[in-house]
Every structure is written in structure tokens, then in C-alpha cells.
Image (cartoon, helix red, strand yellow):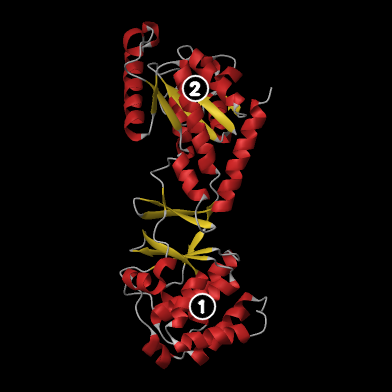
């Protein structure tokens, strides 16, 4: 990966060297001011361009604010609109915010040469600016505090590894289930199938669908059955993830389990399932295939019969109907932390698709095989880098 190393220079030259050396040993490309002529001679637009091109930004901050280019109307290489009193180092950080910067601050308790402390040997405005910036970074970002070059290099190496693993988790798009149109009642028609068809067109292999039960008085058991039956056949949907109130994770189950368990409780649903199995191979045209299933549904489960069979789907009912086949646990991730236990929980998950939660709230779904494959790649790449 391309990693941009941002800091002031003369006070942190040894720290930068230790970090750059480790990152290159890890196989990464390091971009930094060493590539330029001198600290004060770096054109700001070139620095910001390199920040944009980097995969990861690393910001290292001690007690110097750094070179401040003249505001608008200054040298020709100063971009128009550059805010006054903003150092190149802070400008790089501001530009990198969307990249989720990795921030490291010199520990306030660490000894530091007086000439490299703006509050003692620098300009008052620089001392105020670096103090304000450090307070922001410490308060609003999960910053690491370092003391020595070796300590900093160790922390940076661990943070970059975690970011690399995080970026390779292989998130699966968990599209929402059917919209309100299917829940209005009456026959299933073109209008009520529109949202499902649109989802399938956008993602022909819709491996995971989320179903929000809301307050437990929204989804009907009959329409949940139809979703599991149709999505499983037409889109290859493997897993339904159930949430409550839009985000709280309730559990997950395969489309086959949901379909078969609900069919066992209702003869009309069982008849619909049997008729589906008797039909010839599905049409390659998605709209036509959906129409065929809707036509069969309206024949076997017309509104009068459905009214007698349907029940609201609450979290309690879901547990009662699906039993142990409802996987209520998930893999918890605290923020963006990537620990060994977190990765182990993913690769040992019982289903190919793994729900990731934070405090009980569903965050994303990852593919177990993709995570295992990427971990293996990182391990092999590490072995290759370790060879003399």
C-alpha cells in the first residue's frame, strides 16, 4: 500500500526514519518529505496531491507546528484559497480526514529538546497553533502516544497491520428486504414486486438480505415466507438477517430454514412450495420469473386464505418458529478494533456470511471465506518479506 508519512521534519527525523524503515520492511511504499528538496520548499499542492494518492495517512505530531506558507496572494505555488496560518503539516491532516488518519502524538511526559518546542523556542502563534491542534487530535481521534523512535515504529506497524486487515474484510452488501409495498395486503402484483425486482437487478447474486421486524407488528409470516422462497431461488440468497427497530440485531437464519419452517405451519404455504418445485426450470428473464411466482402465489394463497394463515412476526415468534436454527449471536467488533479474537471468531463462524455488530447494532456482513483468504495472503506476504 502507499502510505503518506506526515510530520514536521527536523524534530522528528529519527522517528520518521524508524517508521519508514519498518513500513518498507512490511512491503509498503512510503511517501514523505524526504522525497522533496527541503521542508520549507515543499509546494503545498504537491503535498496534498500525494496525500490524495495515498492509501493510508500517518500523522506524527510533537511540539512544533511547522512551516506555514503564505496565505492567498503569496508565492505562486500556494493554492488559491489556502487558509491563513495553516501549516503544511496541518493542511495534510485536514486533507486526509476522509481516509481515517492514523494519528500519533508525542507523549507529554516524554523528554524533548527545548529547541524543538515552539512554546519555548518558537513563535507565540506557532505555540498556540500546535497546542490547539494536539488538543483536537487527542480529543477527537483515537491517537497513539509515543516516547521513542522504536516505540513509535512499533505502534505504527501494528496500526497499519490492523488497517490492512480491516480493509480486506470483504464486506458483503446486505440489501434490505421488501419495502412497504409488499405489506399493503391484497394480491402480489407488478407494483408490489417492484422493489424486489429492483434489488435483484442491482445485485443479481443477493447473498444476504436484511429484514427489519420494526416493532413486531409489521412483517407477516406469509410475506416473510414468500421472500425466503423467491429470493432463495431467483437471487441465490443464502441468509436472512433479522433486525429490530431498524438496527438492533436479532439473529440470522438461512432462507431454506425460514421457508421450510413457515411452510410446516401452514398447508397453503406447503402447497405453494410443492407447486414451485414442480414447475419447470426458472426463466432467465427476472421479471418473468417473478411474475410466474406471483401468479402461482395468488392462485394458491389468495387474500382470503392468506388472511387466515398470516401472523405478525415478532422477535419472540421468530425464536419460537425457528428454534436453534435462528443464530442469535454475532461477532462483536468494538469500533474499528481488529483483534486476534475478532478474526478467529469470523473464520470459525458456522455460516459463510458473518454478521458483525457493535453493542448489539448490526454494522456489516462479511464473507468468511474472503476474510480467511485475505489473512492467508497477508501471512504469506509476510513470509516473503522476511526472506533474506
- Between 149 and 122, the residue placed more toward the observer is 149
Mark 2 Cα shell of 10 Å, populated few (<14), some (14-19), many (≥20) = many
Secondary structure type for disc 1:
helix
Q: Which residue is mark 2?
A: 153
| Disc nearer the start of the sequence (2/1) | 2
Q: Looking at the image, which residue is at 38% across and 44% down? A: 334
Q: Looking at the image, which residue is at 67% across and 30% down? A: 384
Q: Is residue 22 left or right of residue 316?
A: right
Q: How many marks?
A: 2
Q: Looking at the image, which residue is at 39% across and 30% down? A: 143
- Between 230 and 187, the residue placed more toward the observer is 230
Q: Looking at the image, which residue is at 60% across and 34% down? A: 1
Res. 88 visible in picture: no
Res. 58 visible in picture: yes
- Between 202 and 319, the residue placed more toward the observer is 319
The C terminus is located in which quarter? top right
Secondary structure type for disc 2:
helix
Q: Is residue 274 left or right of residue 281?
A: left
Q: Quadrant of residue 235?
A: bottom right
Mark 1 Cα shell of 10 Å, populated few (<14), some (14-19), many (≥20) = some
Q: Is residue 332 left or right of residue 273?
A: left
**Rendering coords of residue 287 (x, y %):** 60, 78
**Rendering coords of residue 333 (x, y %):** 41, 46
* Tag 2 and tag 1, C-beta contact below 8 Å: no
Q: Which residue is mark 1?
A: 193
Whether residue 365 is situated above or below residue 282 in the rendered picture: above
Whether residue 65 is situated above or below residue 229 in the rendered picture: above
- How far apart are the two marked residues, 2 and 1, measured between alpha carbons? 56 Å
**Rendering coords of residue 48 (x, y %):** 53, 30
Q: Quadrant of residue 261?
A: bottom left
The nearer-to-camera label among 2 and 1 is 2
Amino acid at each position: 500500500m502507499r502510505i503518506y508519512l506526515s510530520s514536521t521534519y527536523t524534530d522528528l527525523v529519527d522517528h520518521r526514519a524508524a517508521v519508514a524503515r519498518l513500513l518498507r520492511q512490511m512491503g509498503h511504499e512510503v511517501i514523505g518529505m524526504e522525497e522533496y528538496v527541503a521542508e520549507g520548499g515543499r509546494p503545498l499542492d504537491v503535498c496534498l496531491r500525494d496525500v490524495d494518492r495515498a492509501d493510508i495517512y500517518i500523522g506524527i505530531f510533537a511540539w512544533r507546528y511547522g512551516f506555514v506558507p503564505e496565505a492567498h496572494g503569496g508565492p505562486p505555488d500556494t493554492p488559491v484559497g489556502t487558509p491563513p496560518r495553516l501549516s503544511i503539516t496541518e493542511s495534510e491532516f485536514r486533507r486526509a480526514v476522509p481516509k481515517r488518519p492514523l494519528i500519533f502524538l508525542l507523549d507529554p511526559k516524554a523528554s524533548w529538546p527545548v529547541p524543538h518546542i515552539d512554546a519555548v523556542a518558537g513563535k507565540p502563534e506557532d505555540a498556540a497553533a500546535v497546542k490547539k491542534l494536539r488538543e483536537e487530535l487527542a480529543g477527537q481521534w483515537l491517537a497513539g502516544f509515543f516516547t521513542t523512535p522504536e516505540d513509535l515504529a512499533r505502534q505504527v506497524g501494528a496500526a497499519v497491520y490492523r488497517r490492512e486487515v480491516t480493509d480486506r474484510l470483504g464486506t458483503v452488501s446486505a440489501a434490505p428486504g421488501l419495502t412497504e409495498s409488499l405489506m399493503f395486503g391484497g394480491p402480489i402484483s407488478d407494483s408490489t414486486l417492484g422493489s424486489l425486482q429492483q434489488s435483484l437487478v442491482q445485485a443479481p447474486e443477493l447473498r444476504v438480505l436484511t429484514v427489519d421486524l420494526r416493532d413486531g407488528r409489521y412483517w407477516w409470516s406469509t410475506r416473510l415466507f414468500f421472500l425466503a422462497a423467491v429470493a432463495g431461488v431467483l437471487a441465490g440468497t443464502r441468509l436472512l438477517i433479522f433486525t429490530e427497530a431498524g438496527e438492533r440485531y436479532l439473529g440470522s437464519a438461512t432462507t431454506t430454514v425460514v421457508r421450510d419452517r413457515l411452510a410446516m405451519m401452514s398447508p397453503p404455504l406447503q402447497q405453494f412450495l410443492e407447486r414451485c418445485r414442480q414447475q419447470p426450470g426458472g426463466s432467465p428473464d427476472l421479471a418473468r420469473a417473478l411474475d410466474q411466482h406471483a401468479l402461482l402465489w395468488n392462485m394458491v394463497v389468495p387474500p382470503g386464505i392468506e388472511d387466515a394463515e398470516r401472523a405478525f412476526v415478532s422477535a419472540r415468534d421468530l425464536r419460537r418458529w425457528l428454534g436453534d436454527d435462528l443464530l442469535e449471536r454475532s461477532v462483536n467488533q468494538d469500533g474499528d478494533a481488529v483483534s486476534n479474537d475478532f478474526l478467529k471468531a469470523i473464520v470459525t463462524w458456522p455460516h459463510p456470511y458473518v454478521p458483525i455488530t457493535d453493542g448489539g447494532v448490526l454494522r456489516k456482513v462479511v464473507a468468511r471465506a474472503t476474510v480467511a483468504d485475505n489473512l492467508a495472503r497477508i501471512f504469506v506476504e509476510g513470509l516473503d518479506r522476511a526472506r533474506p
